[in-house]
Each structure stands twice: as structure tokens, then as C-alpha cells.
């Protein structure tokens, strides 16, 4: 069979970040803005996020050697870079075929809504708030930012890279909540309603795993079949708290 896909793909959301913690605090206090000084790209993991990353790294390290990731791609945002490094500490670096930061895996860009809470968006940009409610998060693009469709467009090119350069390899991707959801949309061939329903069911947990394995029995040339969805057992097994802190303004939730 002329296989085009990697043998396995793991999608991991970064560990809890300082930004997740700050956003939760701002929302709880009914504030207008998230109190964090760094650029979004520079926001690091929290102490708990480091613990979560170490727990997940131990799980990857315990996999049989021939089934562990041998390609690691990650968002250039600090919280994703740190998570990837913790995971790679438990992998044999000599066995890694490729390790790359890829800007196409970056967080969804929020434009002028960056660091605003739900209350802040409604207060400062009521017209945009209502427009987003009308258009829906899948197509709504805030000024200077991206819609989910924009993210999906760049991820389509990532899939092209995977089929071109990493066919039959075992690929670990470390990114963000929207990245995980948009990959699911593409790989599972969802439509707008389906992926938004999945999103409404709950946030993607920090350091959770969503994975796909190549199944040659699917279709004429085989396809990627879902194996794990928002899998957090590696954290639970070590008593590490599971968190679902938001990366995006809560107003983006339907």
C-alpha cells in the first residue's frame, strides 16, 4: 500500500500557563483585563504546568521504544516550547528524526481582543461582541486577529508537511487548545457544527493527549483513525491536578 500518512500522531495541549492562571483570576473577579505583562508568545508555564508536563513526559517515556514519537513539532510560544522540552527529556534524543518549532502551530491570534475578559470585550467593544455572537466563533475574525478558519488554513499546510516529510513516522505535536480542535476538524473531516459541538462539551485539558493511528483498512489507501481524545490518565495516575484553563477570551465560547 502506498501509505501517505504518519504511522501515529499525538496532539498535546501545553501545560497550564501563567496566562491561564491570570485569566481565571480576572474572570473570577469580574475584571475587564487579564493582568499579565508578557506578550502572549512569552507567557511561560506555571509551576503546575511544569508538573503536568513532567507527568505526561513520563507516560511517553514508558511507551515501548518502537512506539514512542520520533518527530517532535511544537508551537514557538514559550509555554509550548517548555512543554515539548519536558516531554523530550523522557525520549531518547538519538532516536528523534526531527525536532522543530513551527510558527504554523502558534496560538490563534486575538488581535484587539487580546487579554480582555468577557466583561472587558462587552464593555470596550460591544459592536464586536455582538458581531461575534451573530457570525459565530468559526468565522468571526477580530480586527488584527484570526478566525478558526484562518487557523485551519495554516494547519492544512502542516498536514501537507506531515505527508511529504514524515510519512510512516510517529509525530508528536505540542500546541494550543484551538490547534488541537482545528486538527481534529481536519483529520476527522468534521463540519462547523460538529467541531463547535465538541468545543462546547468542554475545554481541552492542559497536557491532554488526542491521538490518531494509521489504519490501512480504512478507504482505498488507509486513513488516520482516532485513538485517544483529551486523554488525561497520565496526569491522574500521578495525582497531578488536571486543568482546563482558557487560552482564549471566554467570550469566544458559544
Image (cartoon, helix red, strand yellow):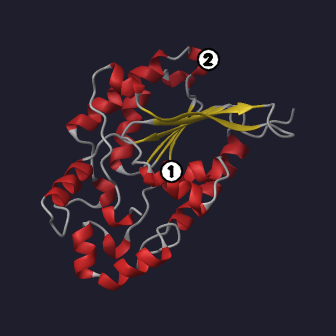
Rendered residue at 22%/79% (across/down): 123
Residue 83 figure quarter: top left
* In front: label 1 or label 2: 1
Q: Is residue 253 above or below residue 158?
A: below
Q: Nearer the viewer, residue 148 or 61?
A: 148
Residue 36 in view (yes/no): no
Total tally of numbered discs in the picture: 2
Horizontally, is 142 left or right of 182 in the view? left
Residue 7 figure quarter: top right
Q: Residue placed farthest to the left in the image?
A: 29
Where residue 118 sits in the image (x, y, percent)? 27, 68
Horizontally, is 150 left or right of 40 in the view? right
Rendered residue at 49%/76% (across/down): 135
Report crowding for label 1: few under 14, some 14 to 19, many 20 or more residues within 10 A (C-alpha). Answer: some
Horizontally, is 220 left or right of 115 in the view? right
Rendered residue at 58%/55% (across/down): 194
Q: Is residue 66 above or below residue 211?
A: above
- Determine whether the residue tagged by mark 1 lies in a helix, strand or loop: helix
Q: Quadrant of the C terminus?
A: bottom left
Residue under circle 1? Answer: 198
- Determine whether the residue tagged by mark 2 lies in a helix, strand or loop: helix
Q: Earlier in the sequence, mark 1 or mark 2?
A: 2
Where residue 61 sits in the image (x, y, percent)? 46, 19
Where residue 109 sits in the image (x, y, percent)? 41, 65
Residue under circle 2? Answer: 66
Report crowding for label 2: few under 14, some 14 to 19, many 20 or more residues within 10 A (C-alpha). Answer: few
Tell me how far mark 1 sits from mark 2, CA to CA.
Answer: 32 Å
Q: Quadrant of the N terminus?
A: top right
Amino acid at each position: 500500500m502506498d501509505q501517505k500518512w504518519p504511522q501515529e500522531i499525538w496532539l498535546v495541549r501545553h501545560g497550564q500557563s501563567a496566562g491561564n492562571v491570570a485569566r481565571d483570576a480576572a474572570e473570577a473577579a469580574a475584571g475587564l483585563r487579564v493582568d499579565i505583562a508578557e506578550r502572549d508568545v512569552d507567557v511561560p508555564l506555571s509551576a503546575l504546568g511544569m508538573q503536568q508536563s513532567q507527568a505526561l513526559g513520563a507516560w511517553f517515556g514508558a511507551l515501548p521504544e518502537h512506539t514512542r514519537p520520533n518527530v517532535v513539532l511544537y508551537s514557538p510560544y514559550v509555554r509550548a516550547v517548555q512543554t515539548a522540552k519536558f516531554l523530550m527529556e523522557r525520549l531518547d534524543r538519538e532516536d528523534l528524526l526531527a525536532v522543530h518549532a513551527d510558527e504554523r502551530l502558534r496560538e490563534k491570534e486575538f488581535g484587539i481582543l487580546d487579554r480582555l475578559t468577557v466583561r472587558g470585550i462587552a464593555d470596550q467593544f460591544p459592536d464586536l461582541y455582538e458581531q461575534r455572537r451573530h457570525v459565530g466563533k468559526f468565522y468571526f475574525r477580530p480586527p488584527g486577529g484570526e478566525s478558526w478558519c484562518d487557523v485551519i488554513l495554516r494547519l492544512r499546510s502542516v498536514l501537507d508537511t506531515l505527508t511529504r516529510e514524515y510519512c510512516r513516522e510517529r509525530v508528536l505535536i505540542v500546541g494550543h487548545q484551538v490547534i488541537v480542535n482545528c486538527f481534529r476538524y481536519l483529520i476527522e473531516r468534521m463540519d462547523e457544527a460538529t467541531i463547535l459541538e465538541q468545543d462546547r462539551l468542554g475545554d481541552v485539558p492542559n497536557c491532554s493527549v488526542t491521538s490518531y493511528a494509521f489504519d490501512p483498512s480504512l478507504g482505498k489507501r488507509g486513513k488516520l483513525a482516532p485513538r485517544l481524545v483529551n486523554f488525561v490518565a497520565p496526569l491522574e495516575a500521578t495525582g497531578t491536578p488536571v486543568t482546563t484553563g482558557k487560552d482564549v477570551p471566554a467570550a469566544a465560547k458559544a
